[in-house]
Image: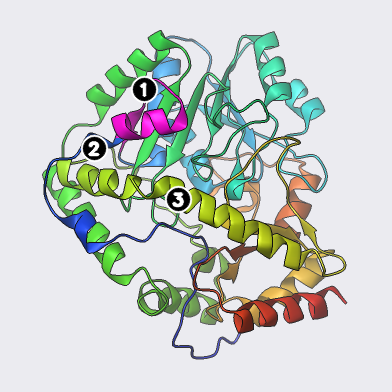
Amino acid sequence: MNAVPRRRWRELPPTAGLPLRWRDLLPGPAPALDRQLAPMLGVDRLQLTCSGTAALVIALRTLSAASHRREVIVPAYTCPLVALAVAHCGLTLKVCDLLPGSLQPDPAMLADLCNTGTLAIVPAHLAGRVVDIAPVCAIAAGYGAFVIEDAAQALGARHADGTVVGALGDIGFYSLAAGKGLTLYEGGLLLSRHPRLQAALHETAAAIAPYRLFRELRRCIELAGYAALYGPHGLRWAYGAPLRRALRHNDPIGAAGDRFPRHIPLHRVGHWRQRVGAHACLRWPDYIESTRRSGMQLRSRLHTIPGIDIVADAPGAQGVWPALLLLLPSADAATRALNALWGEGLGVGRPFVHVLPDYDYLQDLVAPAQVPNARDFAARAVSIGNSPWMRECDLQRIMDTLAAACR
């Protein structure tokens, strides 16, 4: 990657987060965030956690405590934090290839990977796009394994039958990290359609995630910083400067934010951050609808570029639109587009740089695997943030560059 970013005074985010208002930060009575959000999603109960990764750790700890099984199967193309969470729980990771040009796990390979040692399968709904988990659930049921829906990037999306994404598997989890829509800067949510399992998740969270004052103070400061800087001018410093520094050092993993520490913090979310989230939650349904409309409009414009494949939801499903995920016709085309656009402040980048086995810092946690479709997806994938601050001139530059790269 030889991008030479130019100086810009505006910075568009790589994903569309819900901006906070100053009134959200004021102290005062507010219902618990998990209780306020549950009826919006159409579920009975949610468990609030300190991050989406912590939610996955709690889920895996809960399941493994009652089972001798120790293997977890995940898509080869997903967030590296998933691999770190599996390792944190002392479990063994297996990666499954995708169907060509899709986020859907390859059912044939998934069936081959499953055995009596399989504890859970973790399909992922990336960038707000919804995958069909019915084949995954059928395969898991045949081996007595659990299905954990990774809906970290898909809070509010729905399956074809109208069920909220995260509620069709045995367990689902979401992220409330910055840029994921509704945010506490860092936070997560857990749910299960099984009442006993939901109660067990609550017990595990209480046991392994105590209140940690200094950790929570840090998150409060970061949330206040998000409220102050999440805009086209503040993001130039908070997001754009580190991105361009990583690109100057030829560090695409750092630029994409794919390098994570192995330590996974586990602690309770404090009352102030919960109140901030509860206040912002009142605007969340309108945010979902506005980003849906803008995402559909952006998709229709991008569809006019020959050679670009816009990753879609499973038939009948309704995803959310923090960003649009594109597949360019070749890895070379994706490289040309990213050389011209990544770091230019236009919200264009890579969702994840590699498949899990190809991250150097994960090599002792993820075994080598033959996952050609997932590698092809990673090589051709480009994301565009669905930002409300994108201007016509920004979009036109993106489209012209993509069209030239595809030619």
Q: Observer-nearest residue: 127 or 42?
A: 42
Callout in the foreground (3, 2): 3
User: What x and y, as percent, mark residue 18?
Assistant: 40, 57
Q: Earlier in the sequence, mark 3 or mark 1?
A: 1
Residue at point 62% right, 84% down?
393
The residue where tag 1 is placed is 45
Tell me the element at label 2. Answer: loop
Q: Which region is colored magenta?
A: 34-49
Check disc 2: other Cα within 10 Å, few if <14, some if 14-19, many if 20+: many
As measured in the structure, the alpha-carbon distance from the residue carrying label 1 to the one carrying label 2 is 20 Å
The residue where tag 3 is placed is 286
Residue at point 66% right, 16% down?
140
Check disc 3: other Cα within 10 Å, few if <14, some if 14-19, many if 20+: few
Please state, as top left, top right, bottom left or bottom right, where the C terminus lies in the image: bottom right
Give the residue type that dot 3 points to: Asp
Give the residue type that dot 2 points to: His
User: What x and y, as percent, mark residue 312?
Assistant: 73, 47
Q: Earlier in the sequence, mark 1 or mark 2?
A: 1
Mark seen at residue 267: 2
User: What x and y, as percent, mark residue 171?
Assistant: 49, 23
Q: Observer-nearest residue: 278 or 140?
A: 278
For residue 241, say whether it is visible: yes
Above-or-below relation of 127 to 90: below
User: What x and y, as percent, mark residue 124?
Assistant: 60, 38
Give the residue type that dot 1 points to: Arg
Residue at point 23% right, 24% down?
206
